[in-house]
Amino acid sequence: MIRQLDTSFGKTLYEAYLESISSCEPPRRLPAASRDAGLETRPEPFTQLGPERIFGSIRVFDDGEHLILFTVVEQVDRDLYRALKVSDMLDFQSYWDLPFAALCGSYIAELDNAFLIHAGEISQSLPVDEVDGHTFMQLEGVWANSSGRAGLKPLYISKLDEWSQRFRIKEHELTCAFRSREAWDTEFRLWIPQLELDLPQPYEPLVQYSRSCLSKTSKLELEFDRCSDMPRDSLDTKEQHELMEWEEDRVQCRGMGYKTDVLPQKGCRLEERGNGVILLKPDPWLRGRLGTIYCGEFKVFCGQLPEWLVLPKTRGKHLLDLEGWLQFSVKPN
């Protein structure tokens, strides 16, 4: 059972965590491995830490703003590897984490927070700890099991406390740009805090009420955006009537306390593909450009925008449920 942190202790622990990942000044780097030496790709027994070790080492990478602790578990291509986000904040351990012991300390490997990292970035990282061959094989084996992949959380879990949720969101924020490198893989799924952590939804009756105008909202927002500066008499009778109804719905929803301005997606749209799969499609003019996607206040993608992205399993929630709950926005870089 995952422990629920006391509010005061959780807040203190989270503040210590934020301080530990802050890149106030660049960490001291070990000499980079030479081209001739190459990078070691086999787990070995405990040895003196060196920059050439890849598999079996715990490393920290400075992205200029934060320190990212990770361990490599798979070679994807010649100069490309898959890593798991690692943390020494054991009190924040959750259902998706695998605890393990290394030479100098204990850690958790976040199985739902895997990302791609280039060999050059690994060479620039600083090795801080390492595991023996047996422990590495455990990490590798659990990751290789499909049940450890992101987007497949347990069916029955108790909700995490506030500070454990904040920790999990921050850890995924740190790796967002690295995880987004897999966007072109058909198995890639966005990590959405609201869905993965069961964050609060709007008051249910208001969501139910809003569904009556959701189908119009998603369509009319796009259709009438172009008409916002045009005189009403330029629209035909049907368009004028629909626009008037839509605006009345917005006023009613606001009167009930529902934030109707979060219903339309900005720079993208949601689409149901079948079998419960929900796609997020950036607007055509944004595809192929570098950009950032937010779900509410949370960054969920950062990189080259593909034609579409797949949302994680939604646990029975349908397209209209998500459109009334989640607000996505795309910002080109």
Image (cartoon, rainbow, N blue to C red):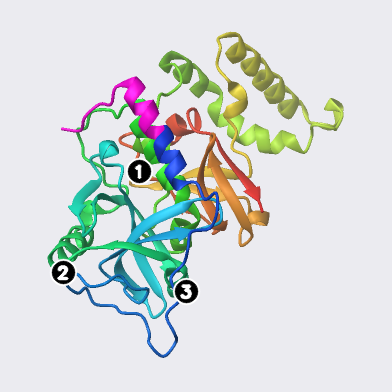
- Label 1 vs 2, first from the N-terminus: 2
Which secondary structure, mark 3? helix
User: Could you tell me which quadrant the C terminus lies in?
Assistant: bottom right
Q: Is residue 7 left or right of residue 104?
A: right
Q: CA distance from mark 3 to mark 1?
A: 39 Å
Mark 1, residues whose alpha carbon is within 10 Å: few (<14), some, or many (≥20)? some
Q: Is residue 150 left or right of residue 307?
A: left
Residue lying at 21% horizontally and 49% vertically, measured from the top left? 98
Residue highlighted by disc 1? 276
Which secondary structure, mark 2? helix
Mark 3, residues whose alpha carbon is within 10 Å: few (<14), some, or many (≥20)? few
- Label 2 vs 3, first from the N-terminus: 3
Query: Can you say whether 114 is above or below 80 in the image?
Result: above
Residue highlighted by disc 3? 120
Q: Is residue 64 left or right of residue 12?
A: right
User: Could you tell me which quadrant the N terminus lies in?
Assistant: top left
Residue 103: quarter of image = bottom left
Q: Nearer the viewer, residue 281 or 37?
A: 37
**Residue 8, horizontal then vertical, whole percent:** 35, 21
